[in-house]
Image: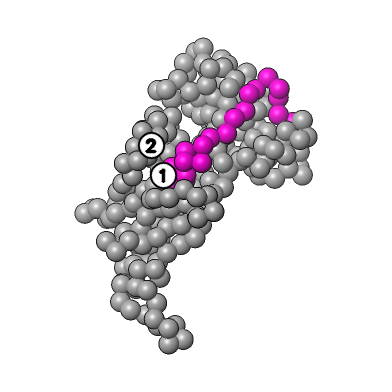
């Protein structure tokens, strides 16, 4: 297993026979949390109020420590994984590493985008943007005698949850989350505004409100999973 990538190792543990047995037991016992350790990484199985079980990795970013969802199980061994881990899934399936006892599925592009938009990773990037705004402000700047858009200078192109995404500064002076044009999905998925206490409030788009609520109940939005 030493030649596996990090994401392949993570999925290897998620679908290991021992993990699947723990999942089946947890559905029966209704125990909320079960720790798992492998490859020098700390995982947990987390039973949600939706009666699904998340497979989560203890992770860290500049804002703190949080549990990063990898995927989830429901109705026994029916599983879903996040976009970030789809390439690893294909490799493990090709090499017959994934147990045939488990039915593994993927999420819709809009669901994966919302998971990215409300992730701890994106929140860390947004925090950095607000720090940069405080340092540079929205005054005009010039590079090689070329005027730089005072809002666009804070725009960021990133890869989060395996998706190419953009954080674009609005004229109201707060960043918004968009998918890259290659996905042909229009509109902002989230906006991020500083509150009076200096924290960041996450504002969702009305069009995705139902999907957001479902993902929130599934506990898949890591911006809310800091420990």
Q: Specify start and end residues of the magenta stretch as a single range.
A: 97-121
Mark 1 in CB contact with mark 2 (< 8 angstroms): yes
Relative image position of residue 123 (x, y in whole percent): 41, 51
Location of the C terminus by quadrant is top left
User: Which badge, 1 or 2, comes first in the chain's sequence?
Assistant: 1
> How many labels, in total?
2
**Please, is residue 80 above or below residue 155 in the view?**
above
Name, please, the residue furthest toward the bottom.
145
Which residue corresponds to mark 1?
A: 118
Q: Quadrant of the N terminus?
A: top right
Task: Decide: is 94 above or below 129.
Answer: above
**Residue at the spot x=34%, y=73% of the render?**
150
Name the foreground residue: 74 vs 223. 74
Q: Residue at x 62, y 18 (%)?
A: 21
- Density class for disc 2 (Cα within 10 Å; few <14, some 14-19, many ≥20) is many
Quadrant in the picture for residue 98: top right
Q: Is residue 81 left or right of residue 154?
A: right
Q: Which residue is mark 2?
A: 212
Q: Residue at the spot x=61%, y=33% of the render? A: 37
Residue 108 painted magenta: yes
Q: Secondary structure at mark 1?
A: loop
Nearer to me, 183 or 202: 183
> How far is the residue under mark 1 from the one under mark 2?
9 Å
Residue 216 can be seen in this image = no
Report the residue at 62% width, 40% height from top.
Answer: 86
Identify the image quadrant of residue 82: top right
């Amino acid at each position: 297993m030493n030649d596996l990538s990090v994401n392949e190792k993570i999925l290897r543990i998620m679908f290991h026979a021992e993990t699947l047995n723990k999942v089946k037991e947890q559905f029966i016992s209704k125990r909320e949390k079960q720790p798992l350790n492998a490859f020098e990484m700390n995982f947990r199985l987390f039973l949600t109020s939706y009666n699904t079980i998340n497979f989560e990795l203890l992770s860290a970013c500049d804002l703190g420590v949080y549990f990063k969802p990898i995927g989830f199980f429901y109705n026994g061994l029916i599983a879903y994984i996040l976009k970030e881990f789809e390439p690893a899934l294909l490799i493990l399936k090709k090499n017959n590493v994934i147990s045939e006892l488990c039915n593994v599925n993927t999420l819709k592009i809009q669901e994966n985008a919302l998971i990215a938009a409300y992730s701890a990773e994106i929140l860390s990037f947004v925090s950095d943007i607000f720090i940069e705004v405080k340092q540079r402000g929205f005054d005009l700047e010039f590079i090689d005698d070329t005027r730089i858009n005072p809002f666009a200078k804070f725009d960021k192109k990133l890869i989060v949850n395996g998706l190419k995404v953009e954080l674009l500064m609005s004229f109201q002076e707060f960043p918004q989350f968009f998918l890259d044009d290659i996905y042909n999905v229009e509109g902002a998925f989230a906006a991020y505004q500083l509150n009076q206490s200096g924290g960041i409030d996450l504002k969702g788009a009305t069009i995705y409100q139902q999907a957001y609520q479902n993902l929130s109940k599934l506990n898949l939005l890591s911006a809310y999973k800091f420990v």
